[in-house]
Amino acid sequence: MNKNNINKIIFLFFIFLFCLFISLFYNENREIFASGECVVDPTIEIRHAEFPKGKIPIGEAVDEAELLAQKIIDEQEIIFFQIISMRDEALSMREEARLEINEAWRLIDLTSPGTNNSQDCVNNCPDACTSDCRKTTGECCEEECETSGDPPETTCWCVLWWKYCKCQTCEGFPCNFGSITNAYNQIENHSGNIESYYNILKDRPAIISNPKDRISDLTNVQNLLPDDPNRWEILNKLLNSRVKLEECLTGYGSVIQEIKTKMKVLSCETALDKIYLGELNIIGYFEDNITPFPHCYPYYASETALYKQFIEENIQPICETNKDSLECQEAIRSFMNNYFCCEGE
């Protein structure tokens, strides 16, 4: 929903609250119905064909606006969490890449020449040291001349009474193949982790696209699901409520005070209380529909209410026998009352 539309709904909502405040606390004719009777006009309006003239559908409008806002918030949260997940996965990929590079440098260090390498398979296995030892036949150097493999390797030969020994040894460390294998395996592991993160990450744009399109549909009133609120219908109910309140509030406008129609704004619950307690006979909208259950939102859903099926299945069966029961009050706790303009003499 763009910012202008949100501001418009908020503005209309506060206009309603302001008008309602004036009606409840500054209406000079709060006790004007001396006959104990008033009329809620049930005539269907021409300008707003779906609404009875005396009904102010502000409860439906506010509840549906809240539902619309919550649906948009839910989709935005999906986008938010997917973006956070993308960030975390990208950071994990970066860390895996850093570790993979470190292992690659370690592998290079193990297999390349360099003066500072501690386990170098090139520089730390230098050419064999060579020494000649001459011993007489009586001092034959058999022990020193034994061949023991590579390295070290010893070559022996004898000339006349002299025996010569050429001893070849490796003074450095032999090539550490265990470290090489470990470094290579670590590189493979980090590479596999990077691929896994990438496979998860590459699907995120499509996942984000779905809630983005959903928000667009909700705000542009297209491709709506059966339980989706219709933004245009909500605005229509808000505008209708504002006009009704302005017309119903005694003292509104510039007409002469003495000839003003005596009207009172009643909430659904207040109207039902006054009817049940015998304090006020409300003719018209409530006249033939007060039984078997309260005939106003949220106790009863009109055809224009988005929550019609929910109320019929979850509220009416509980509230039709006793609207003041704890079970009924708990059932309607999350819903706002519709209001009515009741005209007296």
Image (tube, grey):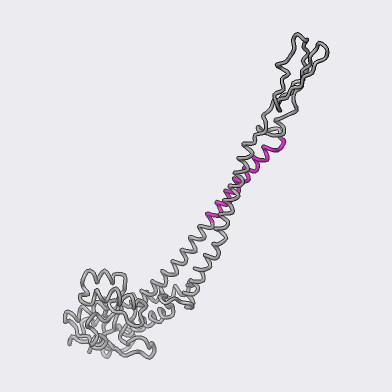
Figure quadrant of residue 47: bottom left
Figure quadrant of residue 255: bottom left
How far from the left and from the top, in percent, is residue 46?
38, 91
**Residue 170 covered by magenta stretch:** no
User: Does residue 54 sit above or below 198 in this rendering?
Assistant: below
How far from the left and from the top, in percent, is residue 225?
44, 76
**Residue 88 covered by magenta stretch:** yes
* Secondary structure character of the magenta stretch overall: helix
From this viewpoint, is residue 21 visible? no
Quadrant of image for the C terminus: bottom left
Q: Which residues are magenta?
A: 87-113
User: Does residue 102 sit above or below 228 in this rendering?
Assistant: above
Q: Who is closer to the viewer here, 211 or 246?
A: 211
From this viewpoint, is residue 286 visible? yes
In this rendering, position of residue 29 left or right of residue 8: left
How far from the left and from the top, in percent, is residue 147?
72, 22
In this rendering, position of residue 100 left or right of residue 276: right
How far from the left and from the top, in percent, is residue 126?
73, 29
Residue at point 80%, 16% (across, down): 158
In this rendering, position of residue 140 left or right of residue 234: right
Residue that protrudes farthest toward the right in the picture: 160
In this rendering, position of residue 104 left or right of residue 55: right
